[in-house]
């Protein structure tokens, strides 16, 4: 067989691989240098990132403040409702323990109830 032909083919294949590797390294170096130069050419990126972070923190703080205000209002409403219920309970207790009706007041109340009943049931119910 012809070994010279095979050796030449192998040598050219190795050269191609070597050249491809060198090309890849060169391209990577170019991209890396280009990336560094872009970062160095745009120092405002850091300022913009810092501004974005500050805006995000400000927004988060506003949300927390809004949530705290909402909770504070809800607590105030609960306290007011509880105070009103306590006041109503005290008034009801005072009314129960309070003055009794006089005989005249009972008579007037009975008369008013009877008049209301007459108004509701004008015709006597049939049996």
Image (cartoon, helix red, strand yellow):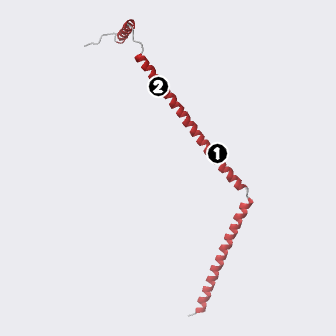
Front position in the image: 67 or 14:
67
**Outermost residue toward the bottom?**
1
**Outermost residue toward the right?**
41
Q: Is residue 89 above or below residue 30?
A: above
Front position in the image: 59 or 35:
59
Please, what secondary structure does the residue beneath circle 1 have?
Answer: helix
Answer few, some or many: residues within 10 Å of disc 2's Cα (few below 14, many 20 plus, some between 14 and 19).
few
Q: Is residue 54 above or below residue 124?
A: below
Real-space Cα separation, disc 2 to disc 1, in angstroms: 42 Å
Please, what secondary structure does the residue beneath circle 2 have?
Answer: helix
Q: Is residue 104 above or below residue 86?
A: above
Q: Position of residue 36 (x, y in %)?
A: 71, 64
Q: Quadrant of the N terminus?
A: bottom right
Residues marked 2 and 1 touching at CB (< 8 Å): no
Q: Position of residue 30 (x, y in %)?
A: 70, 69
Rendered image quadrant of residue 9: bottom right
99 left or right of 74 in image: left
Name the residue located 68 percent from the left edge and 71 percent from the top edge: 27
Answer few, some or many: residues within 10 Å of disc 1's Cα (few below 14, many 20 plus, some between 14 and 19).
few
Q: Position of residue 121 (x, y in %)?
A: 34, 12
Q: Which mark is residue 58?
A: 1
Name the residue located 61 percent from the left edge and 44 percent from the top edge: 61
**Outermost residue toward the top?**
104
Rendered image quadrant of residue 18: bottom right
For label 2, the residue is 86
**Outermost residue toward the left?**
127
Q: Is residue 63 above or below residue 85?
A: below
Q: Quadrant of the C terminus?
A: top left
Q: Which mark is residue 85?
A: none
């Amino acid at each position: 067989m012809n070994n010279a032909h095979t050796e030449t083919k192998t040598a050219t294949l190795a050269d191609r691989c070597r050249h491809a590797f060198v090309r890849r390294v060169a391209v990577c170096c170019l991209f890396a240098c280009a990336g560094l130069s872009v970062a160095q050419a745009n120092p405002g990126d850091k300022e913009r990132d810092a501004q974005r972070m500050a805006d995000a923190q400000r927004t988060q703080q506003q949300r927390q403040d809004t949530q705290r205000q909402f909770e504070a209002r809800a607590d105030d409403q609960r306290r007011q409702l509880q105070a009103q219920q306590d006041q109503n309970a005290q008034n009801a207790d005072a009314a129960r323990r309070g003055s009794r009706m006089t005989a005249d007041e009972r008579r007037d109340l009975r008369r008013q109830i009877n008049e209301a009943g007459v108004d509701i049931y004008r015709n006597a119910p049939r049996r």
